Amino acid sequence: MSEGLLERREGPAGDGAASEAMVVVEDLVRTFGTGDTAVHALGGVSFSVARGELVALKGRSGSGKTTLLNIIGGLDRADAGTVTVDGTTLNDLAERELLALRRDRMG
C-alpha cells in the first residue's frame, strides 16, 4: 500500500489542532500464513492523519484496506511496525487495554 492509495481532504475548521497527528502508522507489516501460501497484506506502510483531516482509503480488492483498518482499530496486530492513535501506541497495549481503548475512545 502506498501513499497513492490515500486520498486526503481537509476537514472542517476546528480549534487550530488540525496539524496534530491523530493516527500515525510507521512501517506496518502484516502477513497471513507462512511459506508458499503466505499472503503479504501490508508491506511497510507508513502515513499519518492529522486531527480534523479526512482521508479516504482506496484500493483494489485484497490490497490490505480492511487489514489496515483492523490494525488501526485494535482488532488485529501487525507483525512489525507501530500504530499510534491519539497519542497511544497500540503495540504497547495488552488485549485488555485494547478492549478498554476501543470501548472508551473509539466507540
Image (cartoon, rainbow, N blue to C red):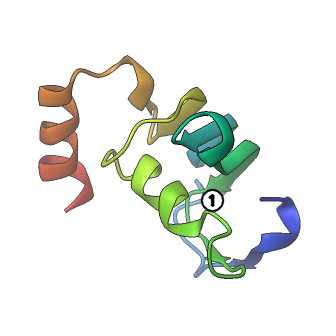
Q: Is residue 55 left or right of residue 88?
A: right
The residue sitting at 41% across, 36% down in the picture is: 77
Q: Looking at this rendering, what residue extends furthest in the front direction?
A: 36
Residue 67 drawn above or below residue 45: below
Query: Residue 82 placed where, x, y %?
Result: 58, 29
Q: Is residue 67 left or right of residue 8?
A: left
The residue sitting at 44% across, 42% down in the picture is: 86
**Label 1: which secondary element:** loop
Amino acid, disc 1: Ala
Query: Residue 20 placed where, x, y %?
Result: 62, 46
Residue 44 appears anywhere in the view: yes
Q: Residue 1 falls in which quadrant of the image?
A: bottom right
Instruction: From the image, tell me which residue sits under label 1.
Output: 18
Q: Nearer the viewer, residue 86 or 98?
A: 98
Task: Check disc 1: other Cα within 10 Å, few if <14, some if 14-19, many if 20+.
Answer: some
Query: Residue 64 placed where, x, y %?
Result: 61, 62
The residue sitting at 40% across, 56% down in the picture is: 70
The residue sitting at 50% across, 58% down in the picture is: 67
Q: Nearer the viewer, residue 100 or 2?
A: 2
Q: Residue 62 falls in which quadrant of the image?
A: bottom right
The tally of labels here is 1
Q: Is residue 86 left or right of residue 22?
A: left
Residue 20 appears anywhere in the view: no
Query: Residue 61 placed where, x, y %?
Result: 63, 81
Looking at the rendered image, the quarter that the C terminus falls into is bottom left
